[in-house]
């Protein structure tokens, strides 16, 4: 409950800001950052992490090869079958986009990333483009050689504001395609995937592979 979430925030040294409802997600990186030694944990306002969320994130990042970890989520205000379908409709397209970046995409409501990778990607992300989807922008900015681990045990439940209206869903889709096009212009999806699969033996571009 609320007491547990407060305790989790204290344990990871919470530094939270405020994001107005309806504000573009571009400021999420600054608004929902939680630091724990050499990691940054992120979530969103109103998120309800699993009781073992912090322990799971730390356990996954104990592997020095892993740059970031992310996982699934549900929508606590969309009950029953509708909620399950909403979660599938939200996450499956993002997982598909992951093939075009060379690793699983990051979901900003449920992710932890090493500080070194966060800082390296922060030099690449597009902070001044209001059409950019910030989670995908960050994931692309890590480059195809980043080791992002998708962990089913890392779970949160969030508000289903993405499904609040058709306009909100359409805006999210537009931001997704816009962000993909920006990064594919630097290196195409096929090259990114092959670079990832071969660990940089082919199609390695040091200007794209921010972390390796």
Image (cartoon, grey):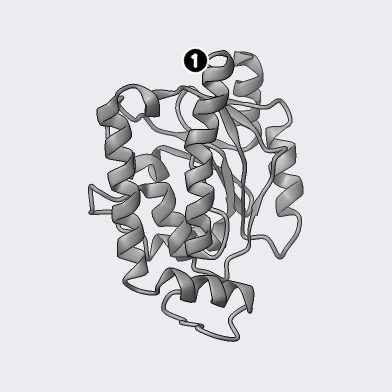
* Residue 112 falls left or right of residue 27: right
Q: Secondary structure at mark 1?
A: loop
Specify the quadrant of the image occupied by residue 168: top left
In the rendering, at what x and y percent does residue 124 appear? 37, 65
In the rendering, at what x and y percent does residue 175 appear? 30, 47
The reply to whether residue 210 is visible in this rendering is: no
- In the depicted view, which residue is nearer to us: 167 or 125? 167
The reply to whether residue 50 is visible in this rendering is: yes
* Residue 94 falls left or right of residue 178: right
Q: Quadrant of the N terminus?
A: top right
* Residue 211 falls left or right of residue 165: right
Identify residue for label 1: 77
Q: Residue at x 45, y 33 (%)?
A: 16
Specify the quadrant of the image occupied by residue 73: top right
- In the depicted view, which residue is nearer to us: 82 or 18? 82
Q: Residue at x 54, y 13 (%)?
A: 79
Please tell me whether residue 146 is drawn above or below residue 198 in the rendered image: above
């Amino acid at each position: 409950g609320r007491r547990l979430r407060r305790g989790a925030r204290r344990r990871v040294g919470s530094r939270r800001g405020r994001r107005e409802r309806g504000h573009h997600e571009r400021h999420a990186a600054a608004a929902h950052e939680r630091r724990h030694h050499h990691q940054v944990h992120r979530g969103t306002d109103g998120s309800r992490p699993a009781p073992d969320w912090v322990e799971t994130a730390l356990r996954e990042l104990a592997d020095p090869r892993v740059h970031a970890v992310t996982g699934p989520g549900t929508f606590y205000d969309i009950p029953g079958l509708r909620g399950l379908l909403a979660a599938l409709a939200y996450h499956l397209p993002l997982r598909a986009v992951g093939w075009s970046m060379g690793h699983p995409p990051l979901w900003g409501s449920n992710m932890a990333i090493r500080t070194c990778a966060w800082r390296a990607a922060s030099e690449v992300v597009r902070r001044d483009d209001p059409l950019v989807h910030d989670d995908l922008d960050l994931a692309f900015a890590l480059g195809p050689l980043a080791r992002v681990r998708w962990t089913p045990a890392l779970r949160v439940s969030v508000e289903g504001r993405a499904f609040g209206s058709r306009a909100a869903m359409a805006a999210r889709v537009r931001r997704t395609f816009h962000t993909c096009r920006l990064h594919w212009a630097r290196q195409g999806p096929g090259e990114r995937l092959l670079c990832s699969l071969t660990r940089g033996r082919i199609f390695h571009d040091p200007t794209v592979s921010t972390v390796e």
